[in-house]
Image (cartoon, rainbow, N blue to C red):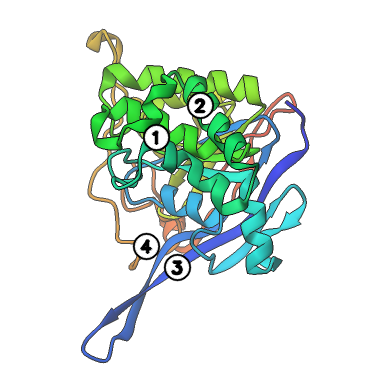
């Protein structure tokens, strides 16, 4: 893994207008992603965690420009995606692919498995007809399925098998960067480890770079080199995987880790339980967005929005957005 960023995200925002009435007048704005910045080095896996509704999936889509960012910049391999024309962005997407959350909805039920995997090759005009067919067979074997699966349709497979098919489709164009949007959350617990281990193996074999979005913190630790914690459209902490799990600094990160089930409940100690519900992204709290649920909030938190400041040691960055970290 090199230290050169393959993906550079700066002040990325994705806002949605809230409209009401017959005339559909704008009544507010949902700030799904609001000023997010991070880098992903080539060959690295960056985990992105947080509660449902915090903006993780929106961040993944905005990074790939599947949803056009409201503001900010995304550079991939040194190229500013926001400045590319539509044809150039389409060509760039050969190197950037996405694995979607729901393998039951992300595959076209009308296409055979082979046709669905071949579709990206057809769209980008990669290889001859025979080369595309050979590529489909190779991809099926790569993800642990028999080549005969190409003749079948998605409804004939289990959830784990469908996610393998989705992974094969994402890899069809030989991408360098893959956004995995909660690829295991719709799967049975017994299958999740298989998919994560397959993704890790493919990362090493193919030299892939991942943005791995997930709820399962144990899987995130197993999968990721670094982890970013997101809350209400903002990143509140980023650190190496072991560093974040062993030395969490933000109260929200501590609460997330405290919620991880342990084999021995008596060894858990005092759990940090958050009070209240996640505020609406269309009506954000003033100052620190976490203050309405934070156990250590002070009057300062209502007026001052804490910036990310590096509290790392021994040359390992550990940015945290908290006044009292």
What residue is disc 3 on? 15
Which of the two residues, 22 or 164, is positioned nearer the viewer here? 164
Pair 2/3: label in front? 2
What mark, if any, has residue 137 been given in the picture?
A: 2
| Lower position in the chain sequence, tag 2 or tag 3 | 3
What mark, if any, has residue 125 been given in the picture?
A: none
Is label 1 in a helix, a strand or a loop? loop
What residue is disc 1 on? 183
Residue 126 visible from this viewpoint: yes
In the rendered image, which quarter contains the N terminus?
top right
Pair 4/3: label in front? 3
Q: CA distance from mark 4 to mark 2?
A: 52 Å
Q: Residue at x 25, y 24 (%)?
A: 188
Crowd band around label 1 with a 10 angstrom C-alpha radius: few (<14), some (14–19), many (20+): many
| Lower position in the chain sequence, tag 4 or tag 2 | 2
Is label 2 in a helix, a strand or a loop? helix
| Lower position in the chain sequence, tag 1 or tag 4 | 1
Q: Residue at x 54, y 65 (%)?
A: 69
| Lower position in the chain sequence, tag 1 or tag 3 | 3
Pair 1/4: label in front? 1
Left or right, residue 34 beside residue 83: left
Q: CA distance from mark 4 to mark 3?
A: 16 Å
Crowd band around label 4 with a 10 angstrom C-alpha radius: few (<14), some (14–19), many (20+): some
Left or right, residue 295 beside residue 253: left
- Residue 113 position by quadrant: top left
Q: Are the residues flagged by discs 2 and 1 in contact, CB closer than 8 Å?
A: no
Which of the two residues, 311 or 113, is positioned nearer the viewer here? 113
- Residue 83 screen position, x and y as percent: 70, 67
**Residue most extreme to the bottom:** 23
What mark, if any, has residue 285 been given in the picture?
A: 4
């Amino acid at each position: 893994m090199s230290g050169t960023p393959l993906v550079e995200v700066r002040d990325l925002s994705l806002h949605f207008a809230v409209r009401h009435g017959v005339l559909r007048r704008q009544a507010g704005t949902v700030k799904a992603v609001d000023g997010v910045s991070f880098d992903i080095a080539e060959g690295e896996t960056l985990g992105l965690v947080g509660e449902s509704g915090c903006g993780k999936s929106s961040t993944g889509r905005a990074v790939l420009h599947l949803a056009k960012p409201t503001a900010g910049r995304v550079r991939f391999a040194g190229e500013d995606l926001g400045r590319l024309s539509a044809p150039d962005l389409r060509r760039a997407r050969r190197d950037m692919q996405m694995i979607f959350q729901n393998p039951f909805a992300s595959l076209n039920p009308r296409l055979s498995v082979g046709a669905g995997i071949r579709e990206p090759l057809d769209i980008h005009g990669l290889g001859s007809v025979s080369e595309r067919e050979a590529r489909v067979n190779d991809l099926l074997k790569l993800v642990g399925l028999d080549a005969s699966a190409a003749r079948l349709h998605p409804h004939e497979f289990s959830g784990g098998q469908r996610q393998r098919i989705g992974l094969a489709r994402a890899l069809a164009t030989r991408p360098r960067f893959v956004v995995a949007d909660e690829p295991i959350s719709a799967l049975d617990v017994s299958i999740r480890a298989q998919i994560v281990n397959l993704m890790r193996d493919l990362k090493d074999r193919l030299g892939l770079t991942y943005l791995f979005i997930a709820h399962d913190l144990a899987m995130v630790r197993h999968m990721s080199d670094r982890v970013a914690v997101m809350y209400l459209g903002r990143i509140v902490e980023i650190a190496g995987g072991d560093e974040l799990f062993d030395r969490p600094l933000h109260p929200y990160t501590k609460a997330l880790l405290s919620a991880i089930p342990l084999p021995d409940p008596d060894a858990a100690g005092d759990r940090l339980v958050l009070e209240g519900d996640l505020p609406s992204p269309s009506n954000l709290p003033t100052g620190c967005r976490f203050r309405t649920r934070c156990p250590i909030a002070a009057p300062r938190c209502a007026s001052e929005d804490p910036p990310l400041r590096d509290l790392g040691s021994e040359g390992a960055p550990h940015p945290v957005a908290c006044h009292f970290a």
